[in-house]
Amino acid sequence: MALLGATGLVGQRFIKLLADHPFFEIVALTASSKSSGKRYCEATKWILNSDFPEVVKDLRVLETSPSTLRSCGYNVDVVFSALPSAVARELEPLFAREGFKVISNASAMRLFDDVPLVVPEINPDHVNLIYVQRSKRGWKGFIVTNPNCSTIILTLTLKPIMDCGGIESVHVTTMQAVSGAGFTGVTSMAIIDNVIPFIANEEEKIQTESLKILGRLTESSVEYADILISASCNRVCVLDGHLENVFIKLKRQVDLETIKDSLRNFKGIPQELKLPLAPPSPIIVRGEEDRPQPRLDREEYKGMSVVVGRLRYGKDGWLKYVVLGNNVVRGAAGNSILIGELMAKEGLL
Ligand code: NAP
């Protein structure tokens, strides 16, 4: 596999998770022209609390182009992408056209009718849109996308609740970690001792992407779920881990124990197939009055499980809870790799 945007925050998470992966071998890394030609350890400001994995340390960073990957000396089966969205919009279709199978973190193509937007436990069948994509665009490869980080965390909990009570509307307020903005995204002067009540385009992404993920695959696209979602997003002074306060109006009231059980027991195809990064329990339910918390709960099953707490009904009859997820693992690199594992197991890579 090759990794595009390998030097960034999400790129580094990919490297850490893929360094000794049983399905994928890292053979090529790319970044911007400022990094290409350098050894990975020279080009990257490594921010994880482990050293550079030996397998990538001395790899030469390549220019991000299909022709460079073709001439890297390996047959690359799959390309994971952690490119900024504007760059992805230009470059990823070139890779797909040239026959590369791209699994992308960027938002650029997530809402295109023929592009799968996948959380493997929720909508694994949506990967079949690659056949529509191929016939419509004439690409030899394809693009499958990983959703927005807050959206993945939210939808993992909405799916089992939707299946047991039916959902009419959802209000969600997020408290999002600084790592979600990339390495240079939020300055320390802006965020220390502060909360910023705005994240560009984030509310729209949560409100729309969730409906596609929870929607139904038709012959040539996805019929969006019929739920009203309203989001309000804040950047907070936390390194990793997005916390979300969720308020749900159910179609019919279901007792709390039934909802807790449906969250706890929620599993999908990744668990059935025992995929390497699939957490045995995608959702962990805690009973303490003050959990989940980012510092304590963001590494559950290597950051692949989300943690739910404070599940209760309000006086208005709305179901309320808090959910925490690791934005750079389940919300980015980890979910993308899980998509790759699923597609590999299904023979699609
Ligand atoms: P980042 O830290 O800014 O890293 C961006 C990467 O892209 C770097 O490797 C950079 O290389 C490379 N790059 C920049 N401009 C390029 C160009 N013109 N051509 C080729 N490569 C270029 O960003 P990030 O936080 O890792 O995010 C990466 C993607 O994942 C974004 O689309 C983001 O929206 C998405 N995402 C992020 C999160 C999160 O929690 N952070 C969650 C979900 C999705 P250089 O080092 O050479 O500049």
Image (cartoon, helix red, strand yellow):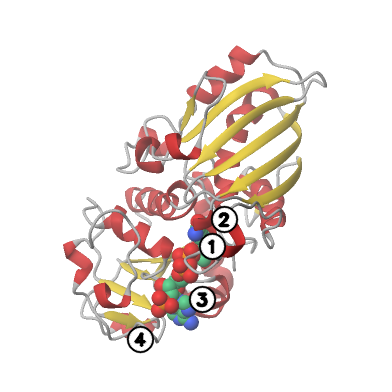
Residue count near mark 3 (Cα–Cα under 10 Å), binned few <14, some 14–19, many ≥20 = some
For marks 2 and 3, give the one nearer the viewer: 2
Q: For mark 3, give the secondary structure.
A: helix
Sooner in the amino-acid sequence: mark 4 or mark 2 = 4
| Residue drawn where x is 39% and y is 72% of the image | 100
Whether residue 142 is visible here, answered yes or no, is: no
Residue 195 position (above or below residue 143): above
* C-alpha separation, residue under disc 4 versus residue under disc 2: 43 Å
Three-letter code, disc 3: Pro
* C-alpha separation, residue under disc 1 versus residue under disc 3: 35 Å
Sooner in the amino-acid sequence: mark 2 or mark 3 = 3
Sooner in the amino-acid sequence: mark 1 or mark 3 = 3
* C-alpha separation, residue under disc 3 versus residue under disc 4: 13 Å
Q: Toward the viewer: 213 or 59?
A: 59
Q: Mark 4 points at which residue?
A: 67
Location of the C terminus by quadrant is bottom left
Q: Name the residue under label 1.
A: 188
Q: For mark 2, give the secondary structure.
A: loop
Q: Are marks 1 and 4 in contact (CB under 8 Å)?
A: no
Three-letter code, disc 2: Ile
Q: Name the residue under label 2.
A: 192
Residue 127 position (above or below residue 52): above
Q: Name the residue under label 3.
A: 93
Sooner in the amino-acid sequence: mark 1 or mark 4 = 4
